[in-house]
Amino acid sequence: MDGSDLVLWKIVFLGVFIMGCYGHHSTQRESKKLSCYECNSLFDPRCGLEFDNYTIALVDCSQKPRPRHLPNHFVPSVCRKSIQRVQGKIRVVRGCGYIEDHMHDDGSCFLKTGTHDVQITHCSCTHSACNKGHNSLNQLQTSAIPLTHIVPDPKYALDGEEALCTKVHLNFPLIFKYSYKLQQHVVFPAFVNMVINPNYSNPSKYGLHGARNIYIESDENVRLGVWHILPENLSHATTYDNKYFDQALNNGNHIIIYSHGNSASRTAPNRVALYKILRKYFHVLAFDYRGYGDSTNVPPTESGVVRDCVSLYEWVANRTTSKIFVWGHSLGTAISTHALSILSTRNIKPYGLILESPFTNLRDEISEYPLSRIFRFLPWFQFTIIEPMHQNNFIFATDRHILNVDCSILILHAEDDVIVPFELGYKLYEEAFQYRQPDQGTVEFIGFSRTFGYGHKRIFLVPQLPRIIENFINRAIEEAENRDTF
Ligand SMILES: *[C@@H]1O[C@H](CO)[C@@H](O)[C@H](O)[C@H]1NC(C)=O
Ligand SMILES: *[C@@H]1O[C@H](CO)[C@@H](O)[C@H](O)[C@H]1NC(C)=O
Ligand SMILES: *[C@@H]1O[C@H](CO)[C@@H](O)[C@H](O)[C@H]1NC(C)=O
Ligand SMILES: *[C@@H]1O[C@H](CO)[C@@H](O)[C@H](O)[C@H]1NC(C)=O
């Protein structure tokens, strides 16, 4: 593809993307939905007697995969809470319910089974968010969900990430089928860079003081641009040199490697805003994959970008004994999970993995992606869009790789995500929860109600995010230490 082709494609992609995304926003789903708290105190103490209404996932029941054994005409209609007392230990399970029971749906509770060492009390109620609260009987009453309605700052408004919108708007599916290059540009629209005149060598231009810009080797002849952002409490020194940064990396502060989504670069404003939160707890290492930012401009492939992530992890691991965490966003969730599954075959494991807006695999993402629903029924859809990408190794099977990742995992997803549907993040959680071995570490899912407006890339605005991160760090370290004592 020469330069003028590229310009043409940029115009096609951006044009289509603007139309596509604009069109989508006017088609809001209807609002009468039941949302319930969903959690299990066995895995998350905040679900228990001292219910914490801020950080527990409130899920939209209609978006949840329906239990397989239920006939189709059942729709989620109640929120449930069950309190199980098993040999003196109390476990609380909350979630959506499908079967109404008019005797009890007023929010009252009843004892369902009782033997001397197992007691189960069921409570159900019919209003959103009603299955919270303490567990004394008759305490389930409805009240409003705390709403802090967020008006998106235009600075963080839809940008190139949303360019994935384009993928099904192409009117020439056959060109798509036969053009590897075109598929590559759909998956990796690296040219979508909304930051004008980025200056990669100057992180302080982005408000990141106490950060250095470095380059590391990935494959032969592939060089990656990386920002090393010091933890906040080390960022006030008067002079920094490379030696200061190198020593700091091994000073015991935790480290997090950030794998971004499929557009723009490490300088994107929503990413920078997240680094500023992360640096309260971590050294942040934010990098650009090959073909992105100022990294070597070779065409990205799945195996290539995964190697980039592996290389950065090794680079860090070779320079520190501090605890390493990994954060992925969007396509970066697939890249980082795949990278960790490769590293685990060499018995290299991080302490924790945080997946922001993940999907199960690219095939699901393309067929679930809201805009593609319009096209999905067409006979050529599978043949011209999905299969060719699969054959060309655009697979991104996070649902498979997550089973090989040996560390605690946290999944964050907003219900109103129009790029990666909430269902896909939740499905990934369910599969990981079901199929991972207990000694691999727990998986936690936190969903954010659509009323907050976080969408695909504004989870950094969640007011409780620092607390969520802090809790996760503590849980992950505790689990890792328990694992090591076996
Ligand atoms: C959530 O918990 C906080 C703190 O306990 C409380 O102030 C608030 O009213 C609760 N909100 C709801 C909807 O229960
Ligand atoms: C980028 O920042 C560096 C370091 O502050 C500076 O020397 C350089 O002139 C800047 N480049 C541009 C194009 O502004
Ligand atoms: C910086 O903060 C981290 C935790 O937030 C702490 O572990 C570390 O000791 C602090 N470092 C310094 C130099 O204060
Ligand atoms: C890290 O160290 C390992 C050996 O411990 C070596 O094989 C690898 O090349 C090193 N990687 C980097 C990126 O320095």
Image: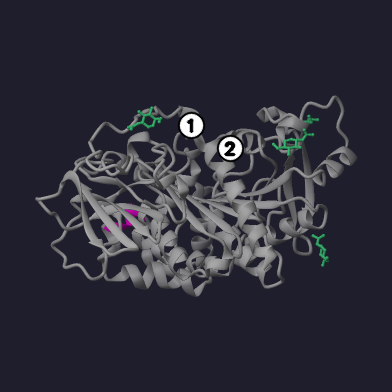
Q: How far across and down, in percent of the image, does residue 157 sit? A: 45, 34
> Which residue is found at the position 26% from the left and 41% from the top?
130
Count of residue discs: 2
Is residue 119 visible to us here?
yes
- Classify mark 1: residues with Cα within 10 Å, few (<14), some (14-19) or many (20+): few
Please state which of residues 241 and 51 is positioned toward the viewer in this rendering.
51
Ligand 1 falls in quadrant: top left
Is 163 situated left or right of 483 in this image?
left
Q: Is residue 370 magenta?
A: yes
Please state which of residues 40 and 399 is positioned toward the viewer in this rendering.
40
Q: Are marks 1 and 2 in contact (CB under 8 Å)?
A: no
Q: Relative to residue 9, is residue 441 depicted above or below?
A: below
- The quadrant holding residue 66 is bottom left
From the image, give the main secondary structure of the stretch colored magenta. helix
* Kind of residue sitting beneath label 1: Pro
Is 337 situated left or right of 452 in this image?
right
> Which residue is found at the position 50% from the left and 61% from the top?
182
Q: Earlier in the sequence, mark 1 or mark 2?
A: 2
Where are the magenta residues, as a range?
369-373
Please state which of residues 15 and 394 is positioned toward the viewer in this rendering.
394
Residue hosting label 2: 274
